[in-house]
Image (spheres, rainbow, N blue to C red):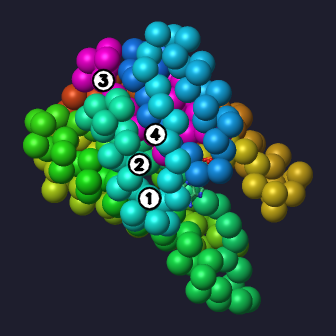
Amino acid sequence: MELANKRALITGAGQGLGRAIAQRLAGAGMDIALHYRDSAEKAQQTAQQIKQLSRRSLAVQADLCEPEQIEIMLEKVRSELGPIDALINNAAIFVPTPLEEFDAAVWKQIFEVNVFGPAALSQSLGKQMKVRGAGKIINILDVAAQRPFASHAGYCASKAALASLTKNWAKALAPQVQVNAVAPGIIDWPDFFSDAQRRSYVQQTPLGRLAAYDDVAGTVLFLLKEASFITGQIINVDGGRTL
Ligand SMILES: NC(=O)c1ccc[n+]([C@@H]2O[C@H](COP(=O)([O-])OP(=O)(O)OC[C@H]3O[C@@H](n4cnc5c(N)ncnc54)[C@H](OP(=O)(O)O)[C@@H]3O)[C@@H](O)[C@H]2O)c1
């Protein structure tokens, strides 16, 4: 897809990986809608930086647990930026769900943010892209969906659900819309990793280091810009750790 003057919506783009993806796509000529929930100041700052690249940018707030807020956000993006050509489902929560106690509220929140939010956005924007005849959706997963952290079963299961939906939407929205996913390995050490576990993780990673935000952002850019005949696929960006 030629990216100049196309429009991307990136969720959770006030900070972290979402922000890095936004900056990378703006650098490639896209106009950017930065979604945030609490990181208003950082999202506004990022929007200003993107405007300095002579791209249009808009920071929009929504709690992905609230379907009405998602609809209001989409209407704002459509009226201020125009129709969206690329959706990046990046926002997620990473919280423990220990075996010792089942907390239904925590499980519900994980699935609301990590699965239902992306589903609402993908269905709404995917249908519009299909009608317009083109579009791309990229879901940010985690290799932990394939090799789970025992302490984070809910998170890992939510990413596995989004992996399944990636394939589902790739079929449902074809041939106009391509739907793919990027599954990073560890970028930021989880708190529960001991020093010994950190050393062992890097030693068992063929490329010998953690993923960087830009490794993932570059793969998103590849899928948007170059991948003309790929759909329903998951690219692991983990330096070979899952081999
Ligand atoms: N970091 C890693 O090591 C790593 C590894 C593998 C995969 N990943 C995946 O990469 C993606 C980004 O990770 P990250 O580390 O950059 O995460 P992060 O810094 O925690 O950012 C995630 C964003 O999600 C947003 N969010 C959380 N709850 C929300 C809600 N209810 N409604 C709307 N937005 C909500 C937050 O927005 P606000 O700040 O605006 O509230 C937050 O900025 C995630 O999908 C994650 O699973 C990360």
Tell me the distance, in whole angstroms, between the alpha carbons under discs 1 and 4: 16 Å
**Which stretch appears magenta?**
1-25
Q: Earlier in the sequence, mark 3 or mark 1?
A: 3
**Is residue 17 located in the magenta-colored stretch of the structure?**
yes
**Three-letter code for the amino acid on which mark 2 is drawn:** Met
Q: Is mark 3 within 8 Å of ligand 1?
A: no
User: How far apart in space, not on screen, are marks 2 and 1 (Cα)?
Assistant: 6 Å
Furthest residue to the right?
A: 195
Q: Residue at x 35, y 56 (%)?
A: 71
> Which comes sooner in the sequence, label 2 or label 3?
3
Mark 4 and mark 1 in contact (Cβ < 8 Å)? no
Label disc, if present, on residue 29 of the rendered structure: none
> Who comes first in sequence, dot 2 or dot 4?
4
In the image, taking residue 220 as reference, residue 135 lies left or right, namely left
Label 4 secondary element: strand
Mark 4 belongs to which amino acid?
A: Ile
Which of the labelled discs sits on residue 10, or is there none? 4
Q: Quadrant of residue 152?
A: bottom right
Q: Is residue 192 magenta?
A: no
> For the residue marked with disc 1, what is the amino acid?
Gln
Q: Position of residue 222 (x, y in %)?
A: 38, 26
* Image point (52%, 31%), residue name: 21
Q: Nearer the viewer, residue 75 or 196?
A: 75
Mark 1 secondary-structure assignment: helix
Task: Tell which of 205 and 59 is nearer to you.
Answer: 59
Report the amino acid beneath label 3: Lys
Q: Measured from the top left, where is residue 31 in percent x and y?
A: 40, 23
Instruction: Identify the residue under disc 1.
Output: 69
